[in-house]
Image (cartoon, helix red, strand yellow):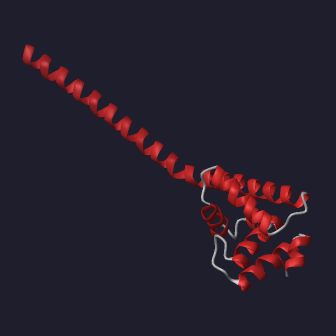
Amino acid sequence: MSNEKNLLNNKSSTESSIKRTTNDDKNQIVNNLKRVDLPLNDSQEILNKVVEELCDLYNIEALKENYNDSVIYSIDKHMKNKHQKPEEIINLCLSNKTNPIIQKNSIIQHILGMCYRRGKWAKNDNYLAFIHYQKSSELGNSNGMCDI
């Protein structure tokens, strides 16, 4: 009788362990799926923050009537103070060219044009500089118009 009780207890214990393991596995899978979605949401938030910072820096320099080189210098200094690499920030913008926050922003288009024109954080390419200046101009940026 005692052996039967032990077998029943062991069986019950094993079943509980299997249920816990199954639930833990399910939770792990759900958590992994949630993590897969995080980079997409995080990357959009990061991109939004980057665009906001770049636009603020650009506008600060524009209010001082400083353009192009001063904007590039300001971005460089700001990013280094935050221990970020400006080339990574520009590459983030370039790798998200089709994102509306990049495509429809005259300031970002102008900054990208300046980067291409000067070969700063992007390869020196006058054609791509012209394309970004033209987009900036079409979006109403007077500095983009001047740089065409």
Please identify the quadrant where the C terminus is shown. bottom right
Q: Position of residue 128 (x, y in %)?
A: 72, 81
Displayed quadrant of residue 94: bottom right
Q: Is residue 8 left or right of residue 27?
A: left
Considering depth in this image, is 141 or 64 the residue closer to the camera? 64
How many numbered marks have been drawn onto this rendered protein structure? 0
Vertical relation: 66 (above or below) 147 = above
Vertical relation: 43 (above or below) 28 = below
Q: Residue at x 72, y 59 (%)?
A: 75
Please identify the quadrant where the N terminus is shown. top left
Q: Does the rendering let one see residue 14?
A: yes
Displayed quadrant of residue 55: bottom right
Residue placed furthest toward the bottom: 127
Q: Position of residue 13 (x, y in %)?
A: 23, 24
Q: Residue at x 89, y 77 (%)?
A: 145
Q: Is residue 127 left or right of residue 121?
A: right
Q: Position of residue 114 (x, y in %)?
A: 75, 73
Considering depth in this image, is 64 or 85 the residue closer to the camera? 64
Displayed quadrant of residue 130: bottom right
Q: Residue at x 60, y 59 (%)?
A: 85
Q: Position of residue 97 (x, y in %)?
A: 69, 70
Q: Does the rendering let one see residue 1?
A: no
Q: Is residue 81 left or right of residue 7?
A: right
